[in-house]
Image: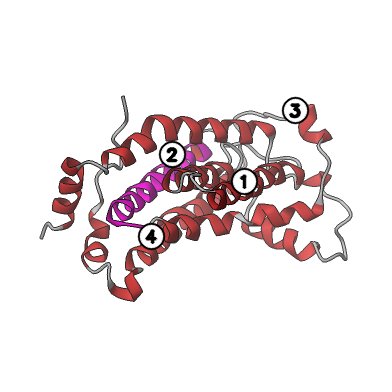
Amino acid sequence: MFLKWGSQPWMIWRSHWRNREMLGGRRVTFAILTAMALFAAIPYTLINRFASVRDWAAFDPTLQLDIDIPFLAWMILPYMTLYLYYPAAAWLGSKNEIMWRQNVVFHQMMLLTCWGVNVIFILLPVEIDLRHLIHGIEGTMWEPFYAAMHGIDTPWNSWPSLHIVQSMQVVLVLRYWYPPTTTRLRITHALLLIMWILLVISTMTIKQHYIWDVATAMLVAGLGWVYWMKPCLERLKTDEFIDKFDARMALD
């Protein structure tokens, strides 16, 4: 059983798909990155601001462990690696025509997931009341990083953590596209997992997320991958769905 939302290519890709050889064969890559900026980053920012202005929290998921986890200023570096995951997925899903089709559909599903999380931010907002635990960064090299992060994100981006959801989706699709069949790929996979684990830990050690946010994000990304994303990507390996994809992209 699998869900089908986003499994058919949207019409916004049609001209890019038809002209995919342009820009050094990277027109679809740049279209994906533009779509993620316009339809994921901007709506998220607006909703984050709206939740801050409304200033209403549906519940408080704070655990004592959230408070006890030590603040580590340098962990903002792995936290910021999230912004490498987006171009990685858009760029590396390009080995063959099947992967290009999967790349388009995968990013549609990423957008749908983002919109679903945004609905939670609106209906069941949670304020992340942990920033008072940040200390010792005044006058250090880390202060501008935290000032910039807090300027971009108000503490209303709680659960499920989009940082975790979207990075986990990218890790899963990269492992799917490039299974560890060689020593080089096994080393690459190990490094990718280490980087991702550090990113996950960073969300809590820089006091940007609760444990609840991380746990629910992993649940959303994991279940979404197993029951939705992977089955839809698998279908795009079959002649039937390749033909459907191409026919939809060829519509006038």
Residue designated by label 4: 32
User: Quadrant of the image for the C terminus?
Assistant: bottom left
Q: Is residue 238 above or below residue 145?
A: above
Q: In what element is the residue under mark 2?
A: helix
In the image, what residue type sits under mark 3?
Leu
The residue shown at (67%, 29%) is 60
Q: In what element is the residue under mark 4?
A: helix
In the image, what residue type sits under mark 2?
Gly
Q: Is residue 177 visible?
A: yes
Residue designated by label 2: 116
Rendered location of residue 174, percent (x, y)? 47, 48
Residue at mark 2 to residue at mark 3: CA–CA distance: 25 Å
Q: Is residue 244 above or below residue 218?
A: below
Q: Is residue 155 visible?
A: no
Task: For marks 1 and 4, give the one nearer the viewer.
Answer: 1
Q: Earlier in the sequence, mark 2 or mark 4?
A: 4
Q: Residues within 10 Å of mark 4 (few under 14, many from 20)?
A: many
